[in-house]
Amino acid sequence: MMITVFCITCHIILVSGSSVSDDVHQIPGHIITKNKDQTKIVCYHNINNYDRILWYKLAENKQLQLLGYCFVGKGYPEPEVHVTIDGGANKNENCTLTIEGLNASSSALYFCAASQHSAACLCSSVQKPHHIFYLCIKDHRHLHLVSH
């Protein structure tokens, strides 16, 4: 029996050094699904004038990959990335990352971050607070995401 652990962990970092860990949220806490299915992760924030939500994946090889972002009510996934991104990125709007065809290579750390558009400010960004999620693939049939 092969068990792969898929972790989503997010930390709050504001470029200026202050913490706004209660202002960026990523849900759900638990997902149970089958291999090759899809899963959705939602990110939203409570920060005035922040109008962009970015999604990142940190794979086991420690390479950080931008998956895409939400801006002006639309999602913009990166080319060659097998995800969809939908929604808005203003205060209290949901930006949804959908990961298609889940498998062992989906195992990674996933981050959402909120930021201001670069023309509006000095590129501050805030990442999701301290939550750890484990997505376990058991026997290549079931996936289970657990929040800690």
Image (cartoon, rainbow, N blue to C red):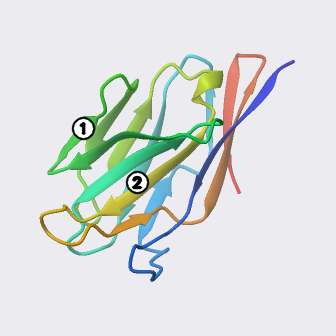
- Residue 115 is situated, as x and y percent measured from the top left of the image, at 30, 63
Figure check: 117 above or below 136: below
- Which residue is the site of mark 2? 43
Residue 92 in the figure: left or right of residue 43? left
**How many other residues sit within 10 Å of disc 2, few (<14), some (14-19) or many (≥20)?**
many
Question: Of callouts 2 and 1, which one flags the residue occurring earlier in the amino acid sequence?
Answer: 2
Residue at position x 50%, y 52% in the image: 27
- Residue 31 is situated, as x and y percent measured from the top left of the image, at 60, 39
- Residue 67 is situated, as x and y percent measured from the top left of the image, at 39, 38
- Which residue is the site of mark 1? 76
Quadrant in which the N terminus is drawn: top right
Figure check: 37 above or below 90: above
Figure check: 81 above or below 5: above
Residue 140 in the figure: left or right of residue 114? right
Q: Secondary structure at mark 2?
A: strand
Q: Amino acid at mark 1?
A: Tyr
Residue 1 in the figure: left or right of residue 131? right
**How many other residues sit within 10 Å of disc 1, few (<14), some (14-19) or many (≥20)?**
some
| Marks 2, 1: nearer the viewer | 1
Q: Amino acid at mark 2?
A: Cys
Residue 146 seen in render = yes
| Most foreground residue, 25 or 115 | 115
Q: Secondary structure at mark 1?
A: strand
Res. 50 image quadrant: bottom left
Label for residue 112?
none
> Could you tell me how far apart the alpha carbons at marks 2 and 1 are, in whole angstroms?
15 Å
Residue at position x 41%, y 33% in the image: 98
Residue 34 seen in render = no
| Most foreground residue, 123 or 146 | 123
- Residue 105 is situated, as x and y percent measured from the top left of the image, at 61, 24
Do the numbered discs 2 and 1 sit on residues whose CB atoms are within 8 Å? no
